[in-house]
Amino acid sequence: MEKPTLEFINNLAVKAGEILLHFAQQDFTIEQKGHRDLVTQADKESERYLIGAILEAFPGHTIVAEEAGELAGVEDHQWFIDPLDGTLNYARGVPFYSVSIGYAFEGKMQLGVVYDPTRAELFCAQRGQRATLNGQPIHVSHFTELVDCMLVTGLPNEVENPPDDNVANFFSFNSQAQTVRRLGSAALDVVYVAAGRLDGFWEVSICQWDIAAGGLIVQEAGGLVTDIYGGPDFMKEPPSIVCANPVIHHKMLAVLAEERARRQS
């Protein structure tokens, strides 16, 4: 069965971004998907376009999408798409949101693209090749001490019995790092780490479509990506993530382990 190219996914992401920008310039519908969780008309139209374009070119591939869920197909060819990561930002006119598209073959991510339509920034990577931003190579930062690092995280709205208390983690990191941010688009958070704009990202409970593409981009930018326990399969249910350069990654895992042990004592 045929595989996609990075160029194909780049074009998908840019087109989906154009859909988001189009709806941002007019009144669009907003629905309450859950407590403090929204879905907009733009989410749905962007996802409809992406699913249609993927299945037209690659019928039979499996797609895991935020709104549609899993569209079952051939397991060896799997897509993870978030048509609008940062819906709350988007709905309020905050220009920090993205389109995220990842493709995996035989269970391993091969292609990843995250597109920020408001800045026309295209982050992408192919396994075994360098990560780029608008065609230029990017690399994780080189800091070795947490005190020099700007970290970023997310706080899930609706999670029962999360594996860690991320509010406690937030304050622990905030006391040791230069600062901690919460920006509202996990896909952009991750690729900002890949580009060295931010130095580390962690989240204790997250969705596969938020991190599938970005995780590969960080790896190809020289970073390490694991779950919050240091396991290599950060996509495994329930997904969680820590990504940074190798030195800071190790120190972030240590902080998380220390905070976990403190809560359990």
Image (tube, grey):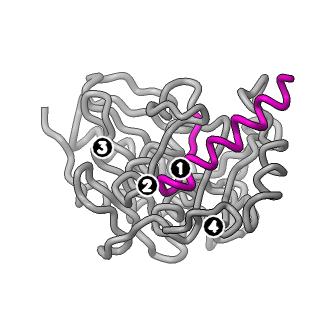
- Give the alpha-carbon distance from disc 1 to disc 3, as whole Å: 29 Å
- Give yes or no for residue 251 being in the magenta stretch: yes
> Which disc, if any, is residue 54?
3
Q: Which mark is residue 198?
A: none
Sequence-wise first label, 2 or 4? 4
Give the camera-side residue of 193 and 206: 193
Identified at 55% across, 67% down, the residue is 143
| First of labels 3, 4 by sequence position | 3
Magenta span includes 49? no
Indicate the position of residue 67 as horizontal and vertical percent values: 56, 37
Instruction: Rate crowding at label 1 as few (under 14), some (14 to 19) or many (20 or more) other CA atoms within 10 Å.
Output: many
Provide residue 118's location: percent of width, then percent of height: 54, 74
- Foreground label between 3 and 2: 2
Q: In this figure, which residue is indicated by the disc labeled 2?
A: 223
Q: Which residue is mark 4?
A: 96
* Residue 91 seen: no
| Disc 1 + disc 2, Cβ < 8 Å | yes
Q: Which mark is residue 243?
A: 1
Q: Amino acid at mark 3?
A: Ile
Query: Which mark is in front, 4 or 1?
Result: 1
Sequence-wise, the earlier of marks 1 and 2 is 2
Rendered image quadrant of residue 256: top right
- Residue 96 appears left or right of 107: right
Predominant secondary structure in magenta?
Answer: helix
